[in-house]
Every structure is written in C-alpha cells, then in structure tokens.
Image (cartoon, rainbow, N blue to C red):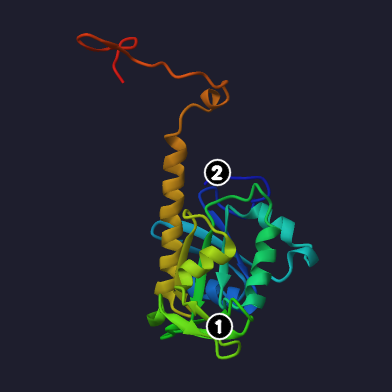
Amino acid sequence: MTHQPGKSDVAADDISVLVLSLHTDMGADFVQTVCPGVSGERGRVLVDGQHFKLDVFAGDPTDSPEWKSKIERADLVVLQVRFMDAISLDRVKRMCKNLPAETPMPMAVFLLRELGEVDFKMSCPSCGQKLWVRDSDEGKRGRCPNCKKAFRLPAQVHHTKVELGLSDTVSVMHIIRGNPASCRRALSNLKVQIAGKMFAMDTMVDPQILRQPTVRIEVQNETLHGVEPIGDEEI
C-alpha cells in the first residue's frame, strides 16, 4: 500500500485495518487470535504474503477523541458484528454514519460466532422481540412468540446487508471466535478484495475523458451493401 501521512509506525506495504466493534473485548479477541503474542488491541500479522496492521475501535465515535486519528491511519475499515437485534444494529449504524465519506474501501463485515454456533440473534420486524434464528430455517415462515406476527426468516449474511444498506461489493463473512484459521481466512479475503480493487483502478479509462462534456454518439449509416463503417473501424 502507498505510505500515507500519519502512518509513521506502519511499513509502506502494510495494510492498516481498523476493526470497528461494539465491544472492546471482542475486537481485542480478534487481534489476539490472528497476532501471536499480542495482548492488546493492536497487532501486526503476515497473511498470504501480506502484512496487516490491526487496530480496534469500540464505543461511540461522537464521544471519542481517538476516532478521527484512528480513521486517518486506516487503509480500510471492517465491522465486527456479534448480534443482529435492533439495539445492536442501531449502535452499528451510528458507527457507520460517523465514517467520513472519503473512508478508504473496501469495507467488510465479520459476523462473529462461537464455535459450533448454528443460529443468530435478530429482532422481530414487527415488535422488536429478540429472537434466535437457526441457519437451517432460512426461507421458512416463522412466528414471533411475543406479537404472533409471521415473517420470512432471513439468512444472516443477507439480513446484515439489508439492515446496514451495504452494496454487493461489501464482503460479509462469518468468523469463529478464538479460531485462528477462521480469522486469518477473513484477512486473506480482504487481500483478494484489495487486489481486485487495485486491478479495477489500473484498468479504468483516462480520468480526463470522464471530465469531458457529454457528446452524442455517432451512428452507423446503412448502405445497400451492408453497414458503412465509421472512421477506420466498425463498431
């Protein structure tokens, strides 16, 4: 990655990742899982030939003097989410809302689960009752025990994208708490995303062309013998 101002403690080819988490211990747990020997909320790790420098932010951005400096040091931001109930989602949304428009992308979401967990917590869309939904029940119609309203049970990944208004380019993946292979795989996926984004940037058209005024397209003229070419080539 290109060295940016304010990143004197980061090697020029490091990818600096800011992990947003509702709880400090969950974020620190992720860092400590992928960075051997680390005991705090920051660490550096080599994954698939790429060094990642990880830092955690937890809490309300509006109350934190660290927020701006952490964002400025980051090459990209990921969200770490445990529960999908209305209260948790509201806090996550407030975090996202406070991200500056120029925040580096891609952004990813890591859905944290305990080992062997096959369900997730969400809220009833009608009354807000917190509910456990099994992965195996995706697509079925469920009924809330509190308000008795029925609704189609979502997959956690799709529910996350819908609730947070994420685009298709944002990767949402499960990670297992305390499982190094699972957490490192999530970082490896980030590397692939970044490589794809850089390739797309390298193959873009000349930015100067994009700033030119809109013009009307040239249309081919039909002739008795077929299509009359425009210029030197046919479209």
Residue under the point 65% across and 47% down? 102
Q: Secondary structure at mark 1?
A: loop
On the question of residue 224 being in view, the answer is yes
Using the numbered discs, state the Cα–Cα distance from disc 1 to disc 2 in whole angstroms.
Answer: 52 Å
Image coords of residue 59 (percent x, y): 71, 71
The mark lying in front, picked from 1 and 2, is: 1
Q: Is residue 104 above or below residue 54?
A: above
Q: Is residue 90 above or below residue 145?
A: above
Count neighbours of disc 1 (C-alpha within 10 A) and say few if under 14, some if 14 to 19, many if 20 or more: few
Judging by the rendered image, the residue that carries numbered circle 2 is 2
Image coords of residue 212 (percent x, y): 56, 21
> Closest to the observer: 138 or 13?
138
Residue type highlighted by circle 2? Thr
Q: Residue 149 has which mark?
A: 1
> Closest to the observer: 69 or 150?
150
How many numbered discs sit on the rendered protein? Answer: 2
Image coords of residue 228 (percent x, y): 28, 10
When asked about the image quadrant of residue 84, the answer is: bottom right
> Closest to the observer: 86 or 35?
86
When asked about the image quadrant of residue 123, the answer is: bottom right
Residue 172 located left or right of residue 60: left
Residue extending farthest to the left is 225
Image coords of residue 144 (percent x, y): 54, 86
Residue 224 located left or right of residue 188: left
